[in-house]
Amino acid sequence: MAEASAPSSNKDDSEGHGHVVAKHYNELQESGRDMRYDSRIFYMRNFNNWIKSVVIGETLSSLKKQSRSQRDISVLDLCSGKGGDLLKWKKGNITKIVCTDIAGTSVEQSEKRYKDMVDRERFKDRVFSAEFITADCSKTRLKDLYKDPEMKFDITSCQFSFHYCFESYNQAEMMLRNAVECLNLGGYFIGTTPNSQELVRRLRDSDDLSFGNDVYKVTYKSDDKTNIPLFGAEYNFHLEGVVDCPEFLVFFPVLEKMAEKHGMKLIYKTPFGEYFEHFVQDRDYKHLLSKMSALEMYPADEGNKLMGNADTEYEHVRLFLEQESKKDDRSESRDQQYRRPRTVGTLSKAEWEAVTLYCVFMFQKVKDLKTGEEWQETTVTETFRKRPADEPLLTSPPKVLKDT
């Protein structure tokens, strides 16, 4: 298949912001659980982690439904950071993982986390093997760095990082090539990334070139809100205590076309809010929300305080509890009501505004370009519909009643 020519660019890919991103994450201090709990975005970070757990769990489930389900499962974790998903992959019973990241310090921490995980395991052979590589995945071909250049993967995962490669066409093309060229036919490329559709909508609704709240702030670099380039559309993203560096809009229609020439098909691209609403209906995933402390309990326990402003950030859940109370009035005696105080899992409005900037995506390899073989099985359905560009996202934060 002939490759499309890259759009012209005045920017030399040897330059760019990769060193800025690497420096930011190399200098980011690892915090303990107590310090993380003190963070304004403690529950938001846990919620995002829950989303990743569901994405990974659902992908592994889809993979195991395939006819070759008895084979070993290998994973490529692009931009793997400090190895925060290693335990998720262990629970998924994979066989091998390759972790890559641009930040050398993060790779070292990831490798240490893996070794600690192995040391804690009584039966060492139950833990997958792992390989760790420090590289800029948007500029370096990873296949040349693997211990076994002929290895194949069943899943490629890129969580909260793919947007960095859209600094230029060449970087996006290299990142995509790394993500999919070693995938088995029928394999998946999954990830989470800022939703450019929502970012642009909020930008154009703002009075100037920035928008946000006390949790996050986005500042668009160009003063032209109308003519936004397909690559290199830079903005600075600040997330309280976690991120403060340049990022780039990922236009999914462009990514989808680029992926097609690598034999990939977009299965879904879904906003976090819609993804949550769908999978919170699953009993196991709902239980996982509680286990991971992914939602803040309202009202707060005695002696504790809410993460957000109690007067302005939780109106959605107060109204919800009032409605539930009226239902109780119609169905129970007052004595029964007093024995069953209502507690609701939620997020503050500020956190939810930040959460709903993101989307989940999944691609599947449906054609091997070398052999021409096409994927025949239909193991994944398009659970989520394609959303019109002008359709508003879910704006109300979660309201999950605690089981009584």
Image: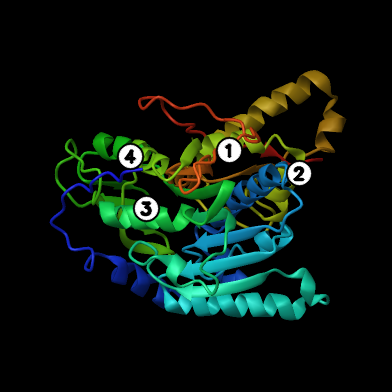
Q: Residues within 10 Å of mark 3 (few under 14, many from 20)?
A: many
Residue 124 rendering spot, x and y as whole percentages: 78, 76
Residue at the spot of label 1:
375
Q: Quadrant of the N terminus?
A: top left
- Secondary structure beneath disc 1? loop
Spot occupied by residue 385 in the image (x, y as percentages of width and height): 52, 26
Residue 284 numbered tag: 2
Going by the numbered disc 2, the residue's amino acid type is: Asp
Instruction: Specify which label sits upstream in the sequence, 2 or 4.
Output: 4
- Identify which amino acid the numbered label 3 is placed on: His
Can you identify the residue that label 3 sits on?
A: 163
- The alpha-carbon separation of the residues under discs 3 and 4 comes to 13 Å
**What is the spatial separation of the Cα atoms under label 3 and label 2, in whole angstroms?**
31 Å
Q: Is residue 156 above or below residue 258?
A: below
Q: Which residue is mark 4?
A: 254
Between 122 and 72, the one nearer to me in the picture: 72
Question: What colour scheme was applied to this rendering of the protein?
Answer: rainbow
Q: Say which of marks 1 and 4 sits in front.
A: 1
Query: Is there CB contact under 8 Å for labels 3 and 2?
Result: no
Q: How many marks?
A: 4
Contact between marks 1 and 4 (CB within 8 A): the answer is no
Say what secondary structure mark 4 lies in. Answer: helix
Label located before the other in sequence (3 or 2) = 3
Question: Which amino acid type is marked by label 1?
Answer: Trp
- Crowd rating for badge 2 (residues with CA inside 10 Å; few <14, some 14–19, many 20+): few
Relative depth, front residue between 241 and 15: 15
Of circles 1 and 2, the one toward us is 1
Q: Please state which amino acid type lies under the numbered disc 4.
A: Val
Q: Quadrant of the C terminus?
A: top right
Q: Give 277 or 385, whichever is nearer the viewer.
A: 385
Distance from label 1 to label 2 (Cα)?
31 Å
Calculate the distance from the C-alpha at mark 1 to the C-alpha at mark 4: 23 Å
